[in-house]
Image: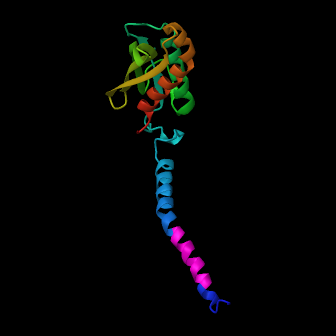
């Protein structure tokens, strides 16, 4: 026997599709909401436009970053100073000077220590190198000083020595510490 009403079959299929869409819709909406929030957040990607420097500031002086920590890595101070100077010159409109500058940056390494990060089978499995840099920004134009502390931890296998870890983590240490100091000084985060 033939179906006397072909529209009834069509409405049945359309109804099933609508029912599936109603079930998927809240999930799809939730996924799209999470995606929108994470992709439009200001801190997810570093952009040059995030650099915040008043128009009155034209020059900068980065003093040598001293190492005042109990343990001294002799290569870290000169390398960190150099990398920070390069980043400021390359990613801002400021001109580096050795004389009086509109902004003067002074910093020192205040902590360079190792602690245990993880234990496995009652033995030390992972060690953590903790580095803290105290940074001071003197604004000569406004005649004010702002102080910051930047800390970062770097994990390494407990089966290697600190000296081996320093070699292995060298580039990562310099890049991360430089980026964090730069962001503290120049970003509105």
Q: Residue furthest left?
A: 144
Residue found 51% across the figure and 72% down from its top:
19
Extreme residue toward the front, this view:
1
Observer-nearest residue: 122 or 154? 122
The answer to whether 52 is drawn above or below residue 164 in the figure is below
Location of residue 15 in the rendering, given as x and y in whole percent from the top left corner: 54, 77
Q: Nearer the viewer, residue 128 or 183?
A: 128
Which quarter of the rendered picture does the C terminus lie within? top left
The answer to whether residue 87 is left or right of residue 138 is right
State whether residue 94 appears in this view: yes
| Residue drawn where x is 58% and y is 82% of the image | 11
Viewer-proximal residue, 178 or 158?
158
Name the spot of residue 29 as percent of width and height, x first: 48, 61
Q: Position of residue 57 (x, y in %)?
A: 44, 33
Residue name at image x 49 percent, y 50 percent: 40
- Does residue 15 show up magenta in the picture? yes
Asked if residue 64 is among those painted magenta in the image, a careful observer would answer no
Number of dots carrying numbers:
0
Residue extent of the magenta highlight? 9-21
User: Magenta-highlighted stretch: main secondary structure?
Assistant: helix
Residue 102 vertical placement versus 70 (above, below): below
Residue extending farthest right: 2
Q: Nearer the viewer, residue 18 or 41?
A: 18
């Amino acid at each position: 026997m033939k179906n006397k009403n072909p529209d009834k079959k069509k409405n049945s299929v359309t109804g099933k599709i609508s029912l599936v869409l109603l079930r998927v819709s809240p999930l799809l909406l939730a996924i799209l909401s999470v995606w929108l929030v994470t992709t439009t957040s200001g801190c997810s990607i570093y952009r040059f436009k995030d650099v915040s420097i008043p128009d009155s500031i034209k020059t900068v002086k980065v003093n040598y970053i001293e190492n005042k920590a109990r343990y001294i890595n002799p290569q870290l101070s000169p390398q960190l100073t150099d990398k920070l100077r390069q980043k400021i010159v390359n990613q801002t409109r400021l001109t580096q000077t050795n004389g009086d500058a509109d902004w003067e940056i002074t910093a020192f390494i205040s902590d360079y220590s190792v602690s245990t990060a993880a234990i496995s089978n009652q033995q030390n499995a992972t060690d953590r190198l903790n580095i803290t840099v105290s940074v001071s920004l003197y604004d000569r134009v406004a005649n004010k000083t702002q102080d910051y502390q930047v800390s970062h931890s770097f994990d390494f296998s407990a089966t290697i020595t600190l000296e081996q870890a320093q070699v292995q983590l060298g580039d990562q240490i310099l890049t991360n510490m430089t980026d964090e100091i730069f962001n503290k000084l120049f970003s509105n985060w």
